[in-house]
Image (tube, helix red, strand yellow):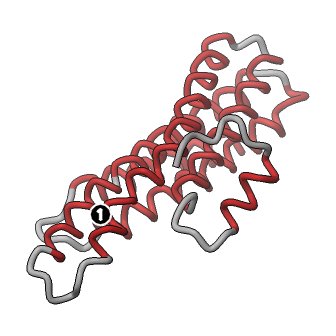
Amino acid sequence: MDGFDDRPLRALLDELAARSPAPSGGAAAGWGCAIAAGVVEMAAAFGELDEIVAEARELRARALDLAGRDGEGYAPVLEAVRLPRDDPNRAPRLADALSDAAEVPLQIASAAARVAELAAAAACEGKRSVRGDATAGAALAVGACAAAAGIVDENIGGREPPDPRVAEAHGALHRARLAAHTQEM
């Protein structure tokens, strides 16, 4: 699936709701991260927190790019699933495809954790009048991070030996939740 840059929000939501493998949860997590970054960018701009504005802008663009790439990364999984169950190549091919498909959601989780951290900084250092917006950005970032980390866990969790990317995704979620909790104080 190509990028989503030129589609209206209503069309994106219709595509998301359709009975189709893409866009799906990974793209939604990416969009959520981008929305969170946009809210943080706005709150930081009102507080004249230029470094936060710049980083949030970069994360917003990155999250949108990742949302567009998520479906592409899942296509090999669907190809492997379609192989006959008795095909000796099916299981290793599916495992490899799921491993590769975990990469974009992992990047989304990492970006969302950073957005939550920026939201906390914007809430603490920025204008009081937009603290609620920074808080909303943090909450949205935590949700995006949780969704992306869950996809990583679904794709590669439970493997022996354990895939270190699962711990990395859980670490990102911990950071996001900690940042959101910190800025609530």
What residue is disc 1 on? 98
Q: Position of residue 169 (x, y in %)?
A: 38, 53
Q: Is residue 108 above or below residue 71?
A: above
* Relative height, residue 53 to residue 180 (above, below): above
Q: Position of residue 5 (x, y in %)?
A: 66, 35
Residue 77 sits in quarter: bottom left
61 or 174: nearer the eye? 61
In-image side of 106 versus 177 (left or right): left
Image vertical order of residue 132 relative to residue 83, above or below: above
* Residue 174 shows in this picture: no
Tell me what residue is drawn at x 41 percent, y 42 percent: 107
Residue lying farthest right?
129
x 22%, y 54%: residue:
164
User: Residue at point 71% right, 35% down?
Assistant: 6
Using the image as rendered, state which of residue 152 and residue 89 is in the foreground. Answer: 89
Measured from the top left, where is residue 73 in percent x and y? 38, 52
In the displayed structure image, the side of residue 60 where residue 90 appears, left or right: left
Q: Rate crowding at label 1 as few (under 14), some (14 to 19) or many (20 or more) other CA atoms within 10 Å.
A: many
Q: At which x and y percent is residue 13?
A: 74, 58
> Dot 1 lies on which element?
helix
Residue furthest bottom in the image: 86
Q: Report whether residue 20 is seen.
A: yes
- Left or right, 167 with reference to 160: right
Number of numbered labels in the structure image: 1
Residue drawn 18% across the image and 76% down it:
90
Q: Amino acid at mark 1?
A: Leu
Using the rendered view, name the quadrant where residue 121 is placed: top right
Q: Quadrant of the C terminus?
A: top right
Q: Would you identify the image quadrant in which residue 128 lies?
A: top right
